[in-house]
Amino acid sequence: MSGVFTDSHAHLEMVAQRLGVFALDGVVAAYAAQPGALILDIGVDPGDLGRRRALVEKSLAGMAEEPGAGPARAIELPIRWAAGIWPGREALDNPKASLEALERDIGAEIDALGECGLDYHHMDAGPEAQRELFGAQIELALSHKLPLIVHSREAFQDTFALVQSCARHIPTIIHCFGYGPEEADSFLRAGCYLSFAGNITYKKSQPLRDALALVPEERLLLETDAPYMNPMPHRGKPSSSLDIERTYQVVSTLRGLDIEALRISVSSNLRRILGMSP
Ligand SMILES: [Zn+2]
């Protein structure tokens, strides 16, 4: 069985920047060949959707030109698209222009809104400016009925206060979950999905493993956050979606679940969130 598993959160453009376009071609080809496997490609900059899409479409077009590939195959596109604004300096300096660019990307049809949220670790701008930009994106997700992908670092209280009510109306994913069991419990009670990344395989990540134990199967997602968070033993090196197998292995062992069963449940959770057929 191939090592291709649904990846709920990757930055394919950054993968191409860090590992080269050939690496991206390899990822796209592998996912196109594995029925049901998906990558949700995540935005961080205002208006970055067109650029990201063009890059992946180039990889797909390259595949179609391969000898023996035949005419336009009826394959399901293995990549889905999110767009959102990460709480970074540039976006926070120009929130109005950033949100207008995001609205144009929403108009170009996306599958989810994100990533957006609060990062009190990097603290590119004060909490108030971050909360405002995050709140505006929650409103956009609600009005367009889009699933929301939430980045939250060292900002549990404020994140929770903002997502608590929206999680009842739209699928709300806490991506690269980075807290412990107590915070997991609060997010789960609010109706959120928790998505775990490669750092769950790191030695010091016991709080993440304790949190994982609380997540019902239908609320669990797994991701690479590629090119970051490479699972052990390649911690620190740039990752791609093809590194996710090691995260699936560790999580399946921790949950006492067959890896194939885990593959199916994570895929069907993401497909359901994105409104796709099972
Ligand atoms: Zn990310």
Image: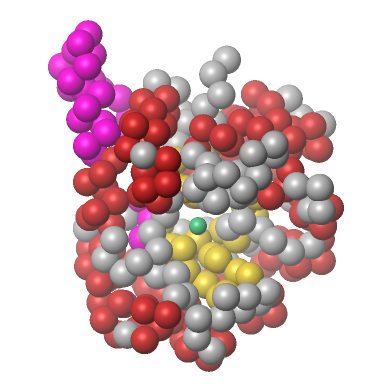
The answer to whether 225 is drawn above or below residue 89 in the figure is: above
Give residue 4's position: percent from left, percent from top: 52, 27
Give residue 94's position: percent from left, percent from top: 32, 85
Q: Residue at x 39, y 33 (%)?
A: 23
Question: Which of the pair 190/40 is nearer the observer?
Answer: 40
Q: Residue at x 37, y 48 (%)?
A: 17
Question: Which of the pair 230/84 is nearer the observer?
Answer: 230
* Left or right of residue 221, residue 92 in this image: left
| Magenta residues (range) | 57-83
Give residue 273's position: percent from left, percent from top: 49, 49
Residue 118 in sight here: yes
The answer to whether 120 is drawn above or below residue 191 in the figure is: below
Residue 109 in sight here: no
- Indicate the quadrant containing the N terminus: top left, top right, bottom left or bottom right: top right
Q: Quadrant of residue 70?
A: top left
Tally the marks: 0
> Does 17 lie within the magenta span?
no
